[in-house]
Structures are given as structure tokens and as C-alpha cells.
Image (cartoon, rainbow, N blue to C red):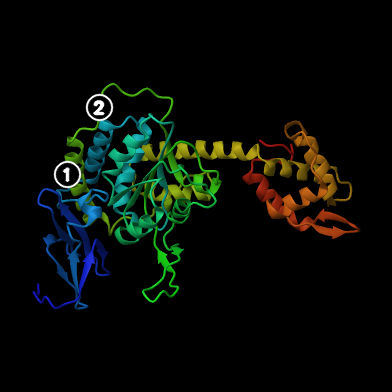
Amino acid sequence: MSTNTKKPTIPTVSRLSPDGTIVELLYNGEERTTALAVSRSDGSVSVEPFLDLASDERLVPYSPTNNLISTGCVLLPSAIGAFAGKQALVDEVRAFIHRYVDLSPLFEEIAAHYVLLTWVYDAFNELGYLRFRGDYGTGKTRALLAVGSLCYKPFFASGASTVSPIFHVLEVFRGTLVLDEADLRFSDATADLTKILNNGNVAGLPLLRTMSNRHRELNPQAFRVYGPKLVAMRQSFSDAALESRFLTEETSGRSLRSDIPIQLPDSLKVEAELLRNKLLAWRFHARSTVGPDASRLVDGIEPRFNQSALALLSLVDDEDLRRRIGAELVLEEARVLQERASSNEATMLGALYEAISTSPDGRISVSDIANAFNRKADGGRGARVTNKWVGGFLRNRLRVATVKSHGVYVVPATERPKIDALAKRFGVTAAASDPV
């Protein structure tokens, strides 16, 4: 290794080179030092003070005095641990979670595998998120601290945090966002945190932020926010698309196990650090061999649910566990379908089918749809909607076209395939013209 100190230096947290070399930042809290852990394509690993590249650049570790690192806001491994096998590692991670957090047995398994997923998430293009949802005092924050401390470069933040540093930390560290009180003080429509969650599950969808250069010229910057995320919140997001990205553990409605410590002991930090070291060794071992496995898609659920869950399922080797996770996804889709079936969209689709069935000449007039909608919804609304409102709802909410024919607005027959597809999505049957 060259000792030429005149090479341009690049402070480095992580680097994945085309030749298979993986570089990760280490931090020793006792000695207050940083170094680079290096895994090469030939399988050799080492700890280096710097790494010279063929491009005549030198990678150097971030300073140990960096505030994010020295305060524990971002957690790192301290060494390259011993790797004994994937299942043994999963068992260790699950045992750690079980000691400090009260989760349902299935979600305990999910959380353990999600921890492993965070360490190789960059081998996948889509990810789901892990969420703990419940009232205060039900263990949400405890779960975030315990599970989050094992994840890949976890960055701990709160919904009350200033959002700007979150963008910068995600861009530089590319780790796991651990977000507490995600629904605090933010609205779904405008919150920057919600934008991070909406864009952060698919690789290649950066967020643009308004920035200025030193000459005060407008210079928008793209921040890469893709990566695994652990979230704790009291309620749900109103955005159904965002909701579908979470695997959720409900923390309310269950008594705390008697063997769970009331306060987290200092030993948790030591145990978590040793496990992070082992997980780093697993990343070095497995990063080049893992990836999405289409054979593990769950039959009978929407593509969106499969998209969010496939990365996790690709790492689950136990066929019975994959089956149980799939069953949970089926139940979650059924719950979403039930919510959709009680929506205005479902009622409108039922009205569309009723108007179709009663039309003698096949014309579906907006007036007939409005009459059918009012019959179905009057009991809950207490007021009748107008033809104009129905036409706007069809066009803007359902994206079903209306055209003027012989002086009245109608839904053309060409829209029937779209109506059938929407009906399936909202759980409405043409035969009954009512939600399932």
C-alpha cells in the first residue's frame, strides 16, 4: 500500500466498488478512533487506516470527533466480527430482541430478518419499512432502540427534529433511518418526512431540495433517501399508498412480559455493538450473493404488497416462516380492501354497476349514476349529491371519462374495462353492485 500523503483524500463512510471491494467505516468508542474495514473480492478482509484507489485517490475514515458518530446519533460497528452462519446470526438477533422487547412471535421473526435486510439493502431496488404502532407507554420507542441498534448504520431521529439534517445524513451515511413519533406535528400532504417515506422505498428516486452555492446562485441538490426505515407512531398515515409500504406491529392491547426489564441496561449497548460487528462480517460474506427472488412472491395479493415484502422474503430461508408472513400480508390486504369497500369510491362504483344494469340502451348517464349513488349513500350522508359533483368525482377521483351525448353527460362504453379494474381493486362486484 502506498504511503503517498499527497493523494486527494476522500472522507468515507461506505464504498462498494465495481470490482467487488466493500469498504465500511468502523468506530471504537473506547479508544475514540475510526478506521476502514475492507472486504476484497478474493474473500480477504482487513482493517486499514486508509485505502488507496487505482484512480489515485485515497479513502480515509470519517473523523472520530464527528458529532454524529461521537454522540451515538449514528451507530457503527467497531470491528469485523466472527461470522458463523446466517441462521445462527438470525437466532442471535432474535434472542437479543426477545430479551429487551415484547413483540408477537411472528413479528419477532420479521424484525430479526429485517435487521439482516438492512445490512444488504443495497442489493435490492425496492424495500418495505418496519413500523411499531400504538399509544404512548406501549413499548414503541423501546422497540425502536433495541431493533434499531442492530441495523446497518442506524440514524436515530424524531418527528420533532429539524428535517434538513435528516436529508444530509441519509445522503452521506446511506444507512437506516430510525424515526420516532413519525406522526407528530406533521401533515401527510406537506411534511418533508412524509416525502422521505414516500420516495425512500425505491432506489433511484431522489428528492430535490432548494440550495444555493457560495455565489448565492440557485443550485438545487438531489438527496438520495432510499434505504431501510424503522418507524414508531401512534396512528396511521391517511395516504393509503404510504400505508402499504409498512410491515406493522400493533403494540397496544397486550400486557408486557414479566421478564422484560423496565429500564434498558447498559449491557444492551455492548451486546448490540458485538452483534453489529457480526452483521458486518455477514454483509461482507453475503452482499454479492443476495438479491430479489421472484419465486418467493406471495400468491393472491396486490403487486404493491409483494413489491414491499419481496426483499424481506428473499432473505427468509424457512419456508414455514415465509408462509406465515404471506398469510399476514393476505390479511392486511383484506383489511385494506374492507376499508376501500366502505369508501365513496366503492359506493360510486356500485352506483356505476347499478346504472349499467338498469340502462335499457346501454347508455350510462351521469344522472342515473347520481340517483344510484344517492340511494346507496343517503343513509350515511344525509344529503343528496348533484350530477355535477358526480361527474367531477368520476373524472378526478376515479379517472373515468364522461362525454356529452344528445345533450346529457354519459360514461362511454370504452370506460368499462377501467370500471371493472377499479371495482376489483375496491372489492365491488358487478353482480351485486355492492361492496364485498
Instruction: Give the residue at x 30% y 43%.
Output: 148
Report whether 343 appears left or right of 242.
right
Residue type at tag 2: Pro
Q: Where does the N terminus fall, quadrant-wise?
A: bottom left
1 or 2: tag closer to the N-terminus? 2
CA gap, disc 1 and disc 2: 20 Å
Give the residue pinned by disc 2.
261
Q: Do the residues labelled 1 and 2 touch (CB within 8 Å)?
A: no
Give the x, y percent position of residue 8.
Answer: 19, 76
Report whether 107 appears left or right of 300.
left
Q: Which residue lies furthest to the right in this view?
A: 406
Total numbered badges shown on the rendered structure: 2
Report whether 285 appears left or right of 192.
left
Give the x, y percent position of residue 10.
Answer: 22, 70
Report whether 285 appears left or right of 370.
left
Residue type at tag 1: Leu
Residue 211 position (above or below residue 156): below
Instruction: Give the residue at x 49% y 37%.
Output: 235
Give the residue pinned by disc 1.
274
